[in-house]
Structure formats: C-alpha cells, structure tokens
Image (cartoon, rainbow, N blue to C red):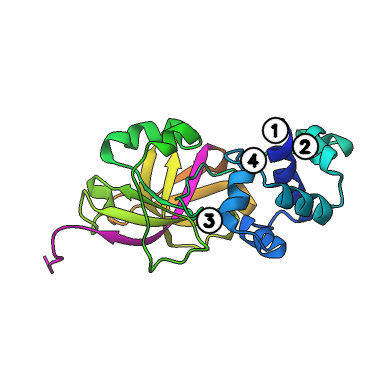
Amino acid sequence: MSTFFSQNLRFLRSKMSEKTSQEKLAELLNIKKPTLGSYESGRAEPKYSDLILLAQFFNVEVDELLKEDLAQRIPGLANKPKLRILATTVDSNNEENIEMVPIKALAGYTASYDDLEFIQELPTFQVPFLPRDKKYRVFPIKGESMLPLKPNSLVFAEYVEDWKSIKDDTICIVVTREEGVVLKKIINHLEAKSILILKSTNPIYDPYPILGAEIQEIWKFAGYFHSDFPTNE
C-alpha cells in the first residue's frame, strides 16, 4: 500500500478544520470511527470501496491519495505541526478496545504511548455501558497526591484530543515524560500562556505549572474501580 495514504488522510481531515474529529469525519463518510482511526494510524489498509469514497469526498484522485504527499501542494504546510495521533487497538468486530495499562507497564508508557506495538501488548476489554463514540483507557494510580482516591485504584479515562477545550478544575490523567502518569485537576492556560496548572486532588500538595509542549496525552476522568468498599474515614 501507499507510503502517503495515512498522512494524507490526517492532513485532509485537518484541512477541513482544526476541530474536525475522527468521529465527525467518520459520520460524514458513513464509516465506523475505529475504521477511520486504523486508516489514519496506518494499522489497516483501506478497502477499495472506502478508498473510492475518500477520494471522491476530498476531491482528489485515488492515485494522488496513495502516492503523493498532498501537504506539499500548499507552501508552508510542510512545516505545520503534525496532528496528534492516538495509538489504539480494535476487537474482531473493528470496535475500539479499552486498553489497561498495568502497574508494570506504567513507567514504559510515557516513552511508548504512541508506539502501536507497545499498545498492542496491553490487556484489552470492552465495557458495554460506556459510549462507543469515545475512546477510553484504564490507568492505575499510586501515591498520596491522588487522595481521596486510594492507591491502586484503576481510573477509567476518556481521551482528549482538543486540550484547549478542557474546562478549569476538570480531573484528568496527564501524561508527560518527566512527571509520568498523574491524576490532577487542570487549570487551563494553554490558549494565553501555553501552560497548564496541575492541582493535586489531595489539597496538601501545591499546584505547579507545566508547559503544553511537555504534555504527551490527556485523558479525562470517567470513573474508577477499587476492590475495597469506600468508608467515611
């Protein structure tokens, strides 16, 4: 298959609008979002019918979509920042899995979060009551800064593509190479200052800033699991 198909598809989606999500484009094309995601990440080769559909939708020739770097057609676009691409997996029905990051894989996640081979080695499962149009992952949490959640809780979190849209005091999993995987409340100054302020859910810890450029992923808190029943202590 083509060298350029995946990057062309990502480029053409970004050209529609910076806020055009995979979900929105999949809806417009009437194909499944996991299918579109697998095309964009290069995990799957397109079916011929989808290839024709995509070429017609974006008003390009199939040959151009496969063999030409379309970003080079417009001066300046070659230097445009790359779209944030999520490495993910799908089940036998082409539905997106929920991957779980075990404790033993937590340290490696910050270095390999975008490595498909690493992600494919993670345990996966499905949760029928979670919306299928959103992407979820499960992270273990540890340390006193994340109280009142107990250490070794498993946090279900929803992938956030547009970081600037995050509202203040939203609880998120923030992934950075230096800090690792942390659960924090976010004060969002990305638009004005290109930073986030991270506040621990345990108030005895001081907030601290982090540059947007240092962030690798953000996942919005969606729920948690712990084997012990909660108490009032």
The CA distance from mark 2 to mark 4 is 11 Å
Residue under numbered circle 1? 1
The single residue placed furthest to the front in the displayed view is: 48
* Left/right of residue 80 with respect to residue 141 in the rendered view: right
Residue at 51% in and 49% down: 196
Q: Are marks 1 and 4 in contact (CB under 8 Å)?
A: yes
Disc 2: CA contacts within 10 A as few (<14), some (14-19) or many (>=20): many
Q: Is residue 219 on the magenta stretch?
A: yes
Under tag 1, what secondary structure? loop
User: Residue under circle 2?
Assistant: 66
Q: Which mark is residue 188?
A: 3
Q: CA distance from mark 1 to mark 2?
A: 8 Å
> Which disc, if any, is residue 40?
none
> Hey, what amino acid is under mark 4?
Glu
Tell me which label, 2 or 4, sits earlier in the chain.
4
Q: Nearer the viewer, mark 3 or mark 1?
A: 1
Quadrant of the rendering where the N terminus is positioned: top right
Q: Nearer the viewer, residue 190 or 181?
A: 181
Q: Residue at x 77, y 37 (%)?
A: 66
The answer to whether residue 81 is visible is no
Do the residues bearing badges 2 and 4 touch, measured as CB atoms within 8 Å? Answer: no
Mark with earlier residue (1, 2): 1
Residue 95, image x, y percentages? 49, 55
| Nearer-N-terminus badge (4/3) | 4
Dot 3 or dot 2, earlier in sequence: 2
Q: Could you give the CA–CA distance between mark 3 and mark 2, rounded to whole angstroms?
A: 39 Å
Q: Which residues are magenta?
A: 214-233
Can you give x and y, in whole percent of width and height, for residue 167 in the image? 52, 63
Q: The residue under label 1 is which amino acid type?
A: Met
Say which element carries label 3.
strand
